[in-house]
Image: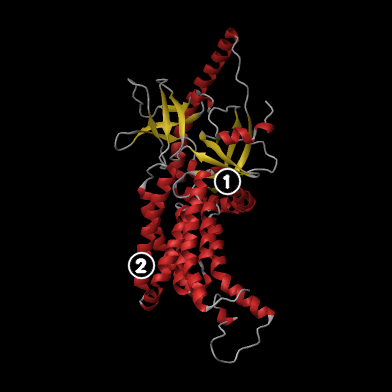
Amino acid sequence: MDDRLPGIRPRPSLWRRLDGIARRSFPTALTMLLLLITAAPFRLPGQAELQNAAALSCVFFWSVYRPGSMPPPAVFLIGLLADLLDFAPPGVGVISLLVAHGVAVRWRRDLMRVGFLLVWLAFAAVATGLASLQWLLTSALTFRLLPAGAALFQAALAAGLYPMLAVLLSRAHRGIAEPANA
Amino acid sequence: MIRLSVPVRQALAKLTLPVFIVASFALMLLGKADALLAERARMALADAMAPLYAALAEPLSGVHRGIEGVRHVATVYDDNIRLRDENERLRRWQSVALALDAENTTLRAQLRWIPDPAPSYVTARVVADAGGIYARAVLLSLGPNHSVAKGQIALDDRGLVGRVTELGARSARVLLLTDLNSRVPVILENSRARAILAGTNGARPRLMYWAEGVQPAEGERVVTSAEANTFPPGLPVGVVRYSASNVPEVLPLARLDRLEVVRLFDYGLRGVVPPEASVARMPERRR
């Protein structure tokens, strides 16, 4: 809990502090859990793209609305997990998630003020840029021109998934992940 | 905890992101420079997840079967007509096959033909898709003391699936023949012309480098060739189909989009195996 705010608050016992830590680490833990779940054998068409989209949506959302719970080291770990699960060249997912985090933190003052539609548009732009970046990096690392259609599909899927995840995440943002509720 | 002044702390907070971006570039270079390290890390994670996914795969494939069942009910009449037709045709082929088999046996007896040794195989469950966005591969769950080696050949009940490319303690990754990096030496069964089957990440790999003067015929069967000592000859791969832009492609016989169980065959072929694999596993091989 923020100690700089004035007011009466309960004594910070061990349990309350643990509760606070759990709430603060909820965004990172949820994102990692989502990665593991989307890697499970559901045999959905485009499941790899879905995994990527879920990670990107989570990192972007928390970086805009609560960057304190999604610091760069956590983003790095999430990206590393995604790369290992994905059998992608290590580092490609990490760098795209870090760029997403950086852009979201840079834009967050503006994004917090505007309506959801504009946030969604900004996310779609970021997702398109990052899909191209990943395509470029993977092509460069495997010395081979990869089909660009997959990158387009990845960006479109991420943009389509974001509103659904954002609804769930903003509920979590006000409820379970709010350290002030501890 | 070290107490820092506010400006120093703010400067450090601003530096974290650039430092981690540099670290991820370093990671990328490391992954490229030491491919074995990246592979070990991946397979360690896959080893940890494989039992979990194997436990999940059972109920999930039950759900899939249920959905399939509902879908089949709708088409059961058409299926029945088609199957009757097919059965009729197969009966005719069966008599041909039996006659050929008998003839083959007598001819082999006269030629003192040395039969190929029966290959040993293990059966493994496909637990997850291990391809990602730019690759086509599956993850297999294996027992803890398995005898699977890199380069072994995976087949399902219909035809060639791919080869084992990465190996963990209780999991293995099989690169499918549709992957962009897959190259399989094949023979066109009617013309006996050799060709290379190159994956495109799409559903149908493409035929390349067939011999001059031969044109792959639509519907012609494609089987593996023993060239390069990677595959045994004659494994069924697929049939030739021409794409809309008149490029000869191969429709794989194996159901690559719904793999549940594959067999890994050990033909004892070590034609093209990554160097580190043959070195690392040398002491274990007793041949």
The disc at residue B37 is 1
The residue carrying pointer 1 sits among few (fewer than 14), some (14 to 19) or many (20 or more) residues within 10 Å by Cα, namely: few
**Up/down of B37 relative to A75, above or below:** above
| Residue identified by numbered label 2 | A122
The quarter of the image holding the N terminus of chain A is bottom right
User: Do pointers 2 and 1 mark residues of a single chain?
Assistant: no
Report the front residue among A27 and B279: B279
Q: Which of marks 2 and 1 is in front?
A: 1
Quadrant hosting residue B121: top right
Q: Left or right: where does residue A33 sit relative to residue B283?
A: left
Count of marks placed on residues:
2
Quadrant hosting residue A164: bottom left
Report the front residue among B154 and A82: A82
Q: Position of residue A58 (x, y in %)?
A: 48, 66
Q: Left or right: where does residue A153 sit relative to residue B26?
A: left
- Which element type, helix, strand or loop, lies under badge 2? helix
Q: Position of residue B205 (x, y in %)?
A: 41, 36
The chain letter under disc 1 is B
Q: Position of residue B92 (x, y in %)?
A: 48, 24
**Up/down of B225 relative to B242, above or below:** above
- Which element type, helix, strand or loop, lies under badge 1? helix
**Up/down of B66 relative to B152, above or below:** below
The quarter of the image holding the C terminus of chain A is bottom right
